[in-house]
Amino acid sequence: MRCELLLALLPVMVTAQTPASRIPRMPDGKPNLNGIWQTMNTANWDLETHGPAAAPVVAMGAQAATPPGLGVVEGNEIPYLPAAAKTKEANYANRLALDPETKCYLPGVPRATYLPYPFQILQSAQSLIIAYEYAGAARNINMGKPQQPPTDTWMGWSNGRWEGDTLVVDVIGFNDQTWFDRAGDFHSDSLHVVERYTPVSAGTIQYQATMEDPKVFSRPWKISMPLYRHLEKNIQLMEFKCAELTEELLYGHLRKKPESITRPSPAQPQQ
């Protein structure tokens, strides 16, 4: 009899453990997204499925090589207009010099999300801020009445709203200086991004972004990936001010007497 009762209650117990019930919540009932998050993919190297590729600087060997990875683009193809596709190819050929990441410029959206660095979501009942470890980038998500951007910027202007348990962020007001990845994928100043952050458990958010740019793409296109919460006891967002690490690269040629940069020779195997 006891076993039969347990079997009868099993569907009820399973239903009670729905994903929605496992999502941490704020006092107002909205999902609690507070925490430090990070992706685990190779999207920053190339949004589309790709194999390994040699480093743009031969002396870097495997250290700067492109690791293979599965694509995060729906349909695994970014729908470039013909002229824009040629620009993308030229970008890739000259990626070391042209990629804004090389110069520590702000990464833009959505690239800031899948750079190989963590980021922190700080959420209250009235406000939501996303702080990124890379270059000290940050976004203040306007959760009130949607507003127009005062000017074009690297990170754009973000208006947020809730659709059920999904945080939807509508981003406009971009300049045309950021890339989507190291493969040369780019956009114009007409870029419009709609992000969707949907928590599926206490430690996972399903992230989706839809890009629209009629100057560069023939139609809107989407990317999606999971974001994972860091669970280390001492986890914190570290400060990575990479701009000072690029000063010689950007301005070294302006010195009256350029500094000599000595690079170590490759280590020789022991005899």
Image (spheres, rainbow, N blue to C red):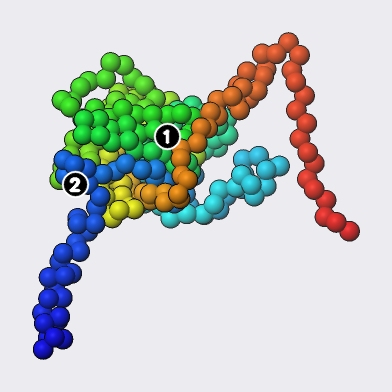
Q: Is residue 218 visible?
A: no
Which mark is on residue 165?
A: 2
Residue 43 image position (x, y, % from top left): 44, 46
Residue 23 image position (x, y, % from top left): 24, 52
Disc 1 residue crowd, few under 14, some 14–19, many 20+, Cα 10 Å? many
Q: Is residue 237 visible?
A: yes
Along the viewing direction, whichever of 53 and 30 lies nearer the viewer: 30
Write down the residue under mark 1. Answer: 132
Horizontal side of residue 107 vs 257, given as left or right: left
Relative vertical location of residue 233 with respect to residue 170 in this rendering, above or below: below
Q: Secondary structure at mark 1?
A: strand
Which mark is on residue 121?
A: none
Along the viewing direction, whichever of 129 and 89 lies nearer the viewer: 129
Q: Residue at x 31, y 46 (%)?
A: 207
**Res 22 quadrant in image:** bottom left
- Lower position in the chain sequence, tag 1 or tag 2: 1
Quarter in which the N terminus is drawn:
bottom left
Q: Residue at x 65, y 23 (%)?
A: 248
Residue 230 image position (x, y, % from top left): 42, 49
Relative vertical location of residue 201 with respect to residue 217 in this rendering, above or below: below
Q: What whole-number distance in Å separates the C-alpha atoms at marks 1 and 2?
A: 23 Å
Q: Residue at x 28, y 32 (%)?
A: 128
**Residue most toward the bottom?**
1
Horizontal side of residue 177 vs 18, given as left or right: right
Horizontal side of residue 229 vs 54, given as left or right: left
Give the amino acid type for the residue marked by disc 1 in the picture.
Answer: Tyr
Disc 2 residue crowd, few under 14, some 14–19, many 20+, Cα 10 Å? some
